[in-house]
Amino acid sequence: MATTIKDVAQYTGLSIATISKYINGGNVLEDNRKRIGEAIEVLDYKVNYAARSLKTNKTMTVGILLPSLFTPFFSLICAYIEPLLKSHGYSMIVCSYHDDPIEEISKLKFLQALSIDGIVAVPTTVTADELTALKIPVVLMDRNVPGLDSVVTDNINAVHDVVEELIIHGHRRIGIILGPPTVTTAYERKLGYERAFADYNLPIDESLIRIGEYDIATGYREMIELLNMKPLPTAVVVSSHDITVGAIMAAYERKLKIPDDIYFVGYDEEQITKVFNAPVTTVLQPLVEIAQSVTELLVKRMNGDYSGYPQLNRLKTTLLRHQPISKIE
């Protein structure tokens, strides 16, 4: 006969509520945690998730939908989200749609079929109507779709402020490498670049605005295009971790010294730049705060609290300066 939660409670002398809280990832006293862990091992207790789902109408599972599993930005945020969800008793299922619009819809339906309690999504082409039709609480991360809860960073000011600082130091030929314009982050970062030039009544050389995907290949290819220009740009700003890596590879292939030959501003993750033995100034997004904001908002919605819906949380970035911006006379 299968061991039940009542057996675990009887073995430990603790209440069923305490046992349930432990099983669902909640916080219990350390002494109680040890007693419950011992009881589960001795009694060979197995959680009947199907029965729990039928009884509570909840699976205590959250789906995470990403455009790619290879992007460190998303992987790191998921690593921060997991323990936060666990503290509320939830597990998570992570899947990717590989930047494929058809796969994006397919993976959403897959998660819906699992009867998950909520979704954290990083959408590319899916619409607000399609997400609302799932009848599941959804919080968007890193992307903003009007009419839905979203947690994003202040992309416009993140790029505006660093380009403004370059302009103040005399830079005029400032290249920028962006992701696809259909993605809100890329659109907003381009807007920040354009606003900085407009603020100082400076013309924009459109050839310095390079557009591709959020990947290493784009960073490498578009940096080569910028480095083939005459005259060279005096500074280059990029807009994602992977683009940063590709662009630095191109600069080093051309044997350019950063920042002596060209000033460079990376994005997202400063550790990788140290591999190139010349840490660069980097726009850092607040990964921990993003994870906290996404988790808190989703748990709130899964608990039936829709106050302030739809909610848009914009979080500030920081600029990590590894080198002073060179003055252009």
Image (tube, helix red, strand yellow):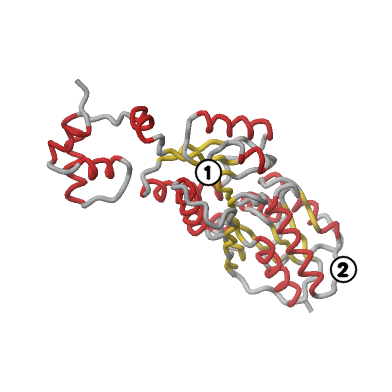
* Left-right relation of 317 to 209: left
Query: What x and y, as percent, mark residue 140?
Result: 58, 48
Q: Is residue 58 above or below residue 162?
A: above
Query: What x and y, as percent, mark residue 249?
Result: 66, 51
Identify the residue at image location x=22%, y=34%. 5
Query: What x and y, as percent, mark residue 33?
Result: 21, 46
Check disc 1: other Cα within 10 Å, few if <14, some if 14-19, many if 20+.
many
| Quadrant of res 233 | bottom right
Circle 2 — which element? loop
- Name the foreground residue: 275 vs 185: 185
* Left-right relation of 256 to 67: right
Quadrant where the image shows the N terminus: top left
Residue for badge 2? 203
Q: Amino acid at mark 2?
A: Pro
Residue for badge 1? 137
Identify the residue at image location x=63%, y=74%. 324
